[in-house]
Amino acid sequence: MDSPLVSAEWLAVGLDFFSTMRIPMLAGRMFTPADFASAAATNAAITAAADAAPKATGSTGPTSVNRSKAQAAPLPVIINEAFAREFFPNQDPVGKHMGEAQEDEPATGPQSGYLIIGITGNAKYNNLRLEIEPTMYVPQVGNSAHFELRTAADPLALVKVVHGIVSSVDDNLPLFDVRTQTKQTDQTLFLDRLMTQISSAFALLALVLACVGLYGLLSYEVSRRTRELGIRMALGAQRHDLLRLVVGQGILLVLIGAATGIAAAIGLTRFMSTILYGVHADDPLTFAGVAILLTLVALAACYIPARRATRVDPMVALRYE
């Protein structure tokens, strides 16, 4: 039976990467120095096979390369929980071998296969907005290296110490791109936070303009009804009845507008949730807060001019234009 094709993310890590980054081991074991030695030997054997492949001629060429591949031990890998759940459902993948070399595979990459030695918890390391993908962690070997340090004090205070330790080993070893985990996370979320700040500024400006416009419109409409209020008072209407009438009509218009605006806002936030990290379409506190604020502004816009109009003498109000 043919084996399923495995497609996964690839991350080379150091010896104590998981304990330093506080990524839990769910099964199996972490990498040991022997795993790094085995990975280095495997890569050396594969490189030798790739270099020997162009020199081989005739029908014996592929056979020579495959023999070189066979001399390389399987590369030890640690998979994450998403990998185990997708490719090994209801199984224990620890100790399983995968990625056998095929006759038609090119002689590049670790073609000797992989030996699963452990399962680790899921973690995001590239993009926080993407879903967690099946990931394989392999020993970091080669001409470059990335390492992590954890400290209870200020991590930036250790930069000079780290530079000194590296220089004491070899003055020609370059050390660059030194960043804290917080800074790296901030850089990953820079565009999201920038868009959030710009959107928040425009939203606040729109809210202020809405409050000013709503207050001005309702105040003008109530002021236009001063003559009407004078007639009602001349006919015996009480001031509190007039206030209730004017304010009730204004609040009714605001509630209709708020309901329409909330429906439109829900549709807009559903779209924004696809482009911003951590934005949810169902945020009742925000919707309720904005609706209450606009209602209070409308209440003030209706009550203040209506109260002022009801205090005017009915004869003066009747002559009001």
Image (cartoon, rainbow, N blue to C red):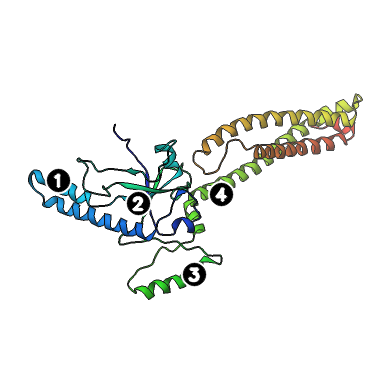
Helix, strand or loop at label 1? It is: helix
Foreground mark, 3 or 4, reads: 3
Figure quadrant of the N terminus: top left
Amino acid type at circle 3 is Leu
Dot 3 alpha-carbon crowd within 10 angstroms: few under 14, some 14 to 19, many 20 or more? few
Seen in the picture, residue 321 relative to 11 is either above or below; the reply is above
* Residue 197, numbered label: 4
Question: What residue sits 72% from the left and 38% below the top?
Answer: 292
- Return the residue at label 1: 63
Mark closer to the chain start, 1 or 3: 1
State the CA–CA distance, disc 4 to disc 2.
45 Å
Q: Nearer the viewer, mark 4 or mark 2?
A: 2
- The residue that disc 3 covers is 158
Residue 7: percent from left, percent from top: 35, 41
Secondary element at image label 3 = helix
SS of the residue under disc 2: strand
Quadrant placement of the C terminus: top right
Q: CA distance from mark 2 to mark 3?
A: 32 Å
What's under tag 1, amino acid-wise? Thr
Q: Are marks 1 and 3 in contact (CB under 8 Å)?
A: no
